[in-house]
Amino acid sequence: MSTLSDAVATPYKDIIYEVIDQVAWITIDRPHVLNACRELTLDEIAHAVQSTKSDPSIACAVITGSGDRAFCSGGDFGSMMRLNWVVASHWNDRMLNCAMTLRGAHIPVIAMVNGWCMGGGHELALWCDVVVASEHAMFGQTGAKVGACPTVGATQYIPRLIGERLAREMIFCARRFNAQEAVQIGLANHCVPHEQLRSKTEELCARIRSHSSQTIRMTKTSLNHESDNLYSSWRAGMELLAHVWGSEEAMEGMNAFMEKRDPDFNRFRARNKQMVEDYLAGVDRSDETELKNAARAREAGKSR
């Protein structure tokens, strides 16, 4: 089991962890990739959040990204492009563990969104209890553009937050929302000037710190109850995602992103159309009357 002393002693590589005024601050420190998460990042976030259970004086946790450009831009393509159906669980289970650790934390977890909050990075914000956004923040689901599948929170929670129709548009069309729009539709709680982001977050932390930890723990469990029933959807989503990783379409989407070009997904539609046409052309519709009669005659002969 993780302990606070473990967290303090652990030489984290991808995050910065510190406790200030009874608040655990977790900063994704990978600005060279806009704070995208690799396997180690997910492990370290989960470990840090889990460690807060060993120090009941911690009132809440804050997750943010280093620098001013990004909260988290999603999954690191360097990791995701190595995935396929066989090894998918090594990535998918990490994401699920991180999500369940944040949701199961005894304390509120606040996402302090300081910039790009996209794809898996937006799912990270969805796993949190409260979202405070800089006016420069941008929220979006990019899976359809890069051949990924946002089934680790996006398909479960976005419809509950902003409604089914808008959720489908956000995911299918990779629609983005700025911070003000995010507050208006329910993806974020607050939109503040960038220079006030930290102070606004600290203000919320101070309010939480002044309230009953017992009440907060119990009510968070109660608030989670209905959406916890969506766990089967998460598990199904993991299996769907496993078959996406390493597929030709996923590789085309990610390679196109890396090469700064538009992906060509229509060639897969054209290929699939030809495969269906070939199959339908080969469907056997011949009259099998003679074959049936011969089979019946043989069976009748055996019964005599």
Image (cartoon, rainbow, N blue to C red):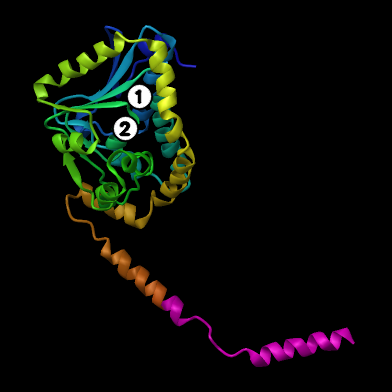
Q: Predominant secondary structure in magenta?
A: helix
Residue drawn where x is 32% and y is 22% of the image: 109
Say whether residue 75 is visible: no
Residue 66 in picture, x, y percent from top left: 20, 24
- Look at mark 1 in the image and give the residue it sits on: 45
Per the rendered image, the range of residues in magenta is: 278-304
- Look at mark 2 in the image and give the residue it sits on: 124
Q: Is residue 209 left or right of residue 71?
A: right
Q: Indicate yes or no whether the magenta region holds residue 295.
A: yes
Residue 104 tag number: none
Amino acid type of the residue tagged 2 in the rendering: Leu
Amino acid type of the residue tagged 1 in the rendering: Ile
Q: Quadrant of residue 161?
A: top left
Q: Indicate yes or no whether the magenta region holds residue 264.
A: no
Q: Is residue 15 left or right of residue 281?
A: left
Residue 280 in picture, x, y percent from top left: 45, 78
The C terminus, quarter of image: bottom right
Q: Nearer the viewer, mark 2 or mark 1?
A: 2
Whether residue 66 is situated above or below residue 184 in the rendered picture: above
